């Protein structure tokens, strides 16, 4: 058994989230890295003791890696937010990863160093940890509907991601995987359109097998999807999909009308997210999701969909 400590704002939601992660054996909410011995909630609440609301996560490393846990942690917090997560403000709600074993640092840094933006999340050795009062443990199980700063979709995405990994285990055909991923996302998350475009040869003729494709010979071709009929071919650098391919990064578009060159397959689509599938440094496909509402997608969607694309597509 191994242990890692995550501070991600109010520990009620963070504990509830990590309890649901396959491979996590035990979670304990508490107060870490402050100055007072065995502080009470009321003392920590004054925001003068230096403790951060923290969840001790004990896990089986054969079932879930520290990198994986760190990725999940970054999917549920805003690492650019200083001393604030959701509506909760104060140093006790700062975000941080506290390790008890120095040997864990490289694995955490593998993920930490790739997090985009101006990251203010602490990465420090654990100096102290005091379990919180009993009523804080399993708080959201004891109080369903109680306060939680994490959005409902955070928990939905976790289920979706873990279920997809299980259902796709052993399936090697990429089209089959993409078909199943599209259906799962669409059904669980209720979006308007979910599907893949694959980087393929643009020629409608079958090329001679000896000729190697140049990037100008490639375009995105409609792949497995769920939703209304869609555009079949998208050129490199065109639309949101072609731009995500070109820029090799996830694009979140809160309002499609504000995105120059957006390709409207349906007039009903109002916001969009496109996540590239990258294999061996090359984009092989993109996952495209459309919503009928403005501003549907944020960094939570981006983080979970990137994990789904990386581990499942
Ligand atoms: N809107 C996309 C085209 C694909 S459809 O949304 C399914 C784009 O601009 O690339």
Image (tube, rainbow, N blue to C red):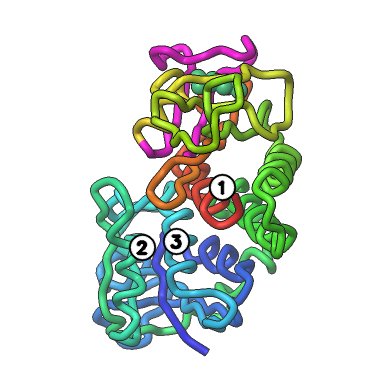
The residue to which callout 2 is attached is 111
**Which secondary structure, mark 1?**
loop
Q: Tell me the crowding category of disc 3: few under 14, some 14 to 19, or many 20 or more residues within 10 angstroms, Cα based.
A: some
Give percent across and percent down for residue 206. 60, 26
* Marker disc for residue 151: 1
Give percent across and percent down for residue 261. 42, 12
Residue 197 vs residue 71, the one in the foreground: 197
- Quick check: is the Cβ at mark 3 less than 8 Å away from ligand 1? no
Asked if disc 3 and disc 2 are in contact, CB closer than 8 Å, the reply is yes
Q: Earlier in the sequence, mark 3 or mark 1?
A: 3
Relative to 213, is 115 above or below?
A: below
The residue stretch that appears in magenta = 248-276
Residue 2 vs residue 114, the one in the foreground: 114
The residue positioned 36% from the left and 63% from the top of the image is 111
Q: Tell me the crowding category of disc 1: few under 14, some 14 to 19, or many 20 or more residues within 10 angstroms, Cα based.
A: few
* Marker disc for residue 71: 3
Give percent across and percent down for residue 208. 54, 31
Distance from Cα at disc 2 to Cα at disc 1: 23 Å
The residue positioned 52% from the left and 82% from the top of the image is 61
Q: Is residue 266 magenta?
A: yes
Q: Is residue 264 magenta?
A: yes
Residue 218 vs residue 109, the one in the foreground: 218
The residue positioned 30% from the left and 75% from the top of the image is 106
Give the side of residue 79 with respect to residue 221, left or right. Answer: left
* Marker disc for residue 115: none
Q: Earlier in the sequence, mark 3 or mark 2?
A: 3
Relative to 16, is 288 above or below?
A: above
């Amino acid at each position: 058994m191994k242990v890692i400590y995550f501070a991600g704002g109010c520990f009620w939601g963070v504990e509830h989230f990590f309890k649901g992660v396959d491979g996590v054996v035990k979670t304990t909410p508490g107060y870490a890295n402050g100055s007072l011995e065995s502080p009470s909630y009321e003392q920590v609440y004054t925001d003068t003791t230096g403790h951060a609301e923290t969840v001790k996560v004990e896990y089986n490393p054969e079932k879930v890696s520290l990198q994986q846990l760190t990725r999940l942690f970054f999917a549920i917090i805003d690492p650019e937010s200083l001393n604030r997560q959701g509506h909760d403000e104060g140093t006790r709600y700062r975000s941080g990863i506290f390790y008890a074993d120095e040997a864990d640092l490289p694995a955490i840094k593998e993920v930490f160093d790739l997090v985009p933006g101006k990251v203010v999340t602490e990465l420090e050795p654990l100096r102290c940890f005091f379990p919180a009062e009993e009523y804080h443990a399993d708080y959201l199980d004891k109080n369903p509907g109680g306060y939680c700063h994490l959005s409902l979709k955070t928990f939905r995405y976790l289920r979706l991601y873990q279920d997809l990994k299980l259902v796709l285990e052993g399936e090697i055909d990429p089209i089959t995987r993409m078909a199943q991923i599209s259906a799962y996302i669409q059904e669980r998350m209720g979006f308007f359109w979910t599907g893949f475009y694959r980087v393929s040869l643009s020629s409608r003729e079958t090329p001679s097998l000896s000729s190697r494709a140049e990037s100008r010979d490639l375009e995105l071709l409609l792949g497995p999807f769920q939703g209304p009929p869609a555009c079949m071919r998208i050129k490199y650098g065109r639309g949101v999909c072609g731009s995500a391919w070109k820029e090799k990064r996830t694009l979140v578009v809160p309002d499609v009308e504000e995105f120059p060159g957006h390709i409207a397959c349906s007039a009903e689509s109002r916001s969009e997210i496109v996540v590239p599938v990258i294999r061996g440094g090359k984009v092989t496909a993109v996952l495209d999701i459309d919503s009928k509402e403005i501003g549907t997608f944020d960094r939570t969607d981006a983080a979970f969909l990137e994990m789904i694309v990386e581990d499942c597509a």
